[in-house]
Each structure stands twice: as structure tokens, then as C-alpha cells.
Amino acid sequence: MLGKIGMDLFLLTLPIQLDIDDNLNWSFSFLSVLLQYRVTWKRGVTMTNKPIESKVISDQLRTQALDWALYEQAKNYALDYMKTVLDRPVYPTDAAIKNLAVFREKLPDQPADPYRVLEKLHQFGSPATVAQTGGRYFGFVNGGILPTALAAKWVVDVWDQNAALYVISPIVSVLEEVCEGWLVDLLGLPPNTAAGFVSGTSTASLCGLVAGRDHLLRRKGWDVSSRGLFGAPEIRVVLGSGAHSTVYKALSILGLGKDRLISVPTDEQGRMRADLLPELDNNTLLILQAGNVNSGAFDPFVEICTKARAADAWVHIDGAFGLWAAASPKLKHLTQGIELADSWSVDAHKTLNAPYDSGLILCRHRESLTQALHMTGSYIIYSENRDGMLYSAEMSRRARAVELWATLMALGRSGVAELIEDLQNKAAYFADCLRNEGFAILNEVCFNQVLVASDDSQQTKEMLKLIQSSGECWCGGASWQGKDVIRISVCSYRTTRQDIEQSAWAFVAAREKVRVG
């Protein structure tokens, strides 16, 4: 056998010994093999075909990656949950919540058995979930999840794509572009409206408002990206008194604090009073609402947006769950005039029943949105195709547009309309059931929100606690025009009339229990 020095000399003289012209391919292949042997030899490792034992975590993970039984176990746990979710308590029992203590432990020193990890999650985690994918969850405007979209989410999770750039994931880029076109058409928005795919309306509103802020200041000759806000011309922010808390949060982040806002009074349904709108100008950021978070009411867009267009103000519409009414021939009258706005925020994981998380920022001025969210770096490779990070505050993002594409494909134009109309019909039926039992319905059920009250605020609050702990259904609470109310949001395709009737009886039982004391 050659010694180390002999092997080095042999490798150095090999090109001379070989006929390069006749044996070029063979010689380079042979040389490559010998070089690999040399590197291994110098490390002092005996050359053998026998696998080398290793305790490096990466080696363990590579082995686990090919353990198909692990994924079968995960699938079985998921299917078990899906098969039982309709029969589970809508809110976890006290025992299930108490058992969550098993997760409060020190980080283990050594890697855990992956099967034990999944087993623990299913055994103690599944019972402690809120069954919002069932038919009797009516809290926080949380939608269900369509079957095709859920199945697509499983596939996308395996892909584990980063949606930042076309060069990172061509499929995500293409489906973002496709969804953008479908959404603009479906909602009746201006051609060339840009769409950004974000986590939810909180982020979407932030993106829309920063685009509006920068757009207004740019017209005044002020570039925020280079000069900041110190010394910038003042912007007037006008919004309704019933604006969602996420709007105030976004304005605070953008340096447009609440003490400087102009709040416009609303009517008894939470709609902005157009007759009390202040004078608008081209330095105004006007924020409207498609779906009041409590009543579901829509601002009078035609009247207000017409004034705003004449003044050249920027109009942003917070349409977290209500903007989808524009896709329904029967309900689109609620959103008449939204096409006159400049930006819109909406969630697909609410009314549309796409998987969490799926928010959208839509902007009439594509360049204003990308200028506000643009970033550069020597390592960033932009292309002539769609690069999703230009339309979002995030760079690294999960491929949520794929699930949205699957949702829209599964429904089609007619399915979207029918789903939205069904949710509105179910909300009206819920209101009728409760009204027939003597409860007060405090809002016009124009969309999917119902506000309920009992004899007085104290009784309503006590009722709500009993309903939430009953396991029969789950609703949230709110304050409406000085009264404590129970807030019902009908958002899931899984909700049936039987679910509503069962839930209405839970209201009746809770009221009787409170009255008895």
C-alpha cells in the first residue's frame, strides 16, 4: 500500500502519466476519486464501506426525515382530531386546561424521541384546543377551514417554501400573481391593483397606511424613506369613532398618534356619519370600515369616497371580514363605492374560510405600495417576475398564497358568493331564534354579526360566562352603546341550522340559570 508521501507524489504526477487527449474524462474521474481518498486518508479515517457511527444531531435528523412511520403517526393524530372535532366541547374543559401543566418543564438536555413529541401533543394538546373548526364557535370572527384548503396546507407544509422572491420559490410567485388577479376581479377593484400576502388585517392595514402616508408626503416633496418624519409636513388622519383597535395600533406604529386623530361620530349601527365628515384635502388619510367589528355595519362609501376623491385624499378601507360582501351579487350593495378607495385590508381566514394565517393588503397604487415596503441588499436577487417581498412588510414569509389559491379554486366565483350569503343567512336565523326566545337583538343583521342582550348588563355578563363554559358553543363579549352585549360572529361553513338551534338553547339555559340564581 502507498504511504501518505507516495500517494501525494502519485497524485501530483498523475496528469503527466495520463494521455490527456485520449483519456480526459476517465482521468478526471479517477483523479477525483483519488483526491477523495487522500482527504479521508489525511484525516486518519480507515476507508471502508461500513457506515460510520455518529452522534451528530444532523445525522439523526437525516435518519428521521426518512422515517415514514413518523409522518403516518402525525397523520393518524390529525385524522383522529378531525373525526372528533364536531363532538368535542367547543371550549376546553377545566381538566384539559389543567393538564397543560405537563408542558411547563425545563428544556431537555438531549433530543427527545420524535414519536413521544407527537404523542404528547395529541394527548394533552388536542383536548386543550378551541374547536373553531367545528360548527358552534362564534367568537372573534374566526372562520373555519375548507377541506381542499386544509389538504393543500398539508402539501405546502411539506414544501416549506419561503415566499420572499421568485428565485426562492417560482411556484409561490406565480400563484401570488394568479390570486392577485382573481381577487381584484372578484371584489371589483380597479385594474392593476396590487396584492400583498400577509399574516392578517393588522399587518395589512399597517402596509396600506404606510403606503398612504408616504404617498401623501411624497406629493409634498418629502421622501420619508430618506428624510424620516422629523420636520415632515403634517398629515391629517380622519376615521370613524368605531374604528377597529388594530387601526389605532397601526397609526401608532407609523408615528400618527391617537391624540392627533380626527374622530367622526357614527350612527346607531356604527356607520360613519357622512354629514359630520370634516373638510378633506390632499393631505388627508381617511380610514373607513367595511364591516363594523360589533354590528357588521358598512360605512356609506359612495358618499364619503366621492368627497375624498374630489379632495385628492387617500382612502383606506378596513374590510377584515366585510370586504368579501363585494363578491356576492345579493350583498354587494353593502360595498358599493369601495372601488373609489386607494387601499383595502381583508382577511381570507375569516369569511372566506381559508386556513390561518391569510391576510391581504390591496392597493390601487402599486408603485406607492412597493416604494413604502421596498428593501435592498447585495444578496437580494430581484427578477422580472413577481417578487412577493415587495408587497409585504416581511421578507421571509410562509407560502400562504398557495392555500388561498386552493380555497378560491375549490369555491369558484359562485361558491364564494354562496358561502358569503349562507353565512349572512345563518346569522339572521340565529338572531331570529334568540329574538323568539325573548332576547334583544341590538343591530341590523346586514352581514354575519349579531349583538345580543338579556334583561340588563349584569345578567348579560353572567350569561356569557355560563355560555362560554358550557362547551355547547362559544361567543365573545363587547360593549355596545353603553351596554354589555354578547357578540356572535357566524363565520364557518360547518355551522348548520341544528348548530344554531343547539346554541340558542344554550343561551336560554344560561339565562334561566342566572335568573334562578
Image (tube, rainbow, N blue to C red):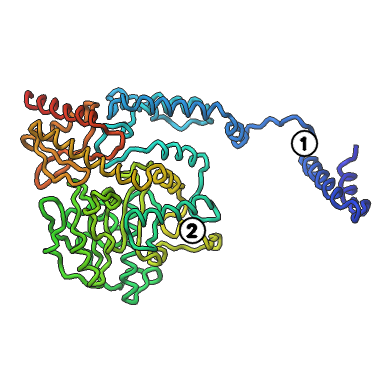
Crowdedness near tag 1: few (<14), some (14–19) or many (≥20) residues, C-alpha within 10 Å = few
At mark 2, the secondary structure is: loop
Q: Which residue is mark 2?
A: 387
Residue drawn at point x = 20 percent, y = 50 percent: 292
The image shows residue 334, relative to residue 67, as above or below, that is below
**Residue at coordinates 39% horizontally, 53% vertically from top-left?**
182
Question: Is 345 on the left-hand or right-hand side of 105?
Answer: left
Is the residue marked by circle 2 packed among few (<14), some (14-19), or many (20+) residues within 10 Å? many
Q: Nearer the viewer, residue 470 or 234?
A: 470
Q: Residue type at mark 1?
A: Val
Residue 444 shows in this picture: yes
Q: Amino acid at mark 2?
A: Asp
- What's the residue at 34%, 74% (across, down)? 222
From the viewer's perspective, tell me whether residue 139 is left or right of residue 68. left
Looking at the rendered image, the disc whose residue lies closer to the viewer, 1 or 2, is: 2
Location of residue 314 in the rendering, given as x and y in whole percent from the top left corner: 27, 66
Callout 1 secondary element: loop
Asked if 367 appears above or below 50 in the picture, the reply is: below
Which picture quadrant has residue 451? top left
The residue at the point 19 percent across, 61 percent down is 259
Residue 29 image position (x, y, % from top left): 82, 47
- Residue that protrudes farthest toward the bottom in the picture: 221
Quarter of the picture containing the C terminus is top left
Horizontal relation, residue 457 to residue 77: left or right: left
> Which quadrant, please, contains the N terminus?
top right
Which residue position is annotated with label 1? Answer: 45
Residue 334 - label:
none
Between 304 and 204, the residue placed more toward the observer is: 304
- Mark 1 → mark 2, Cα distance in angstroms: 47 Å
Write down the quadrant of residue 353 in the picture.
top left
User: Where is residue 45 shown, x and y percent of the image?
Assistant: 77, 36
Q: Answer yes or no: is residue 260 visible.
A: no
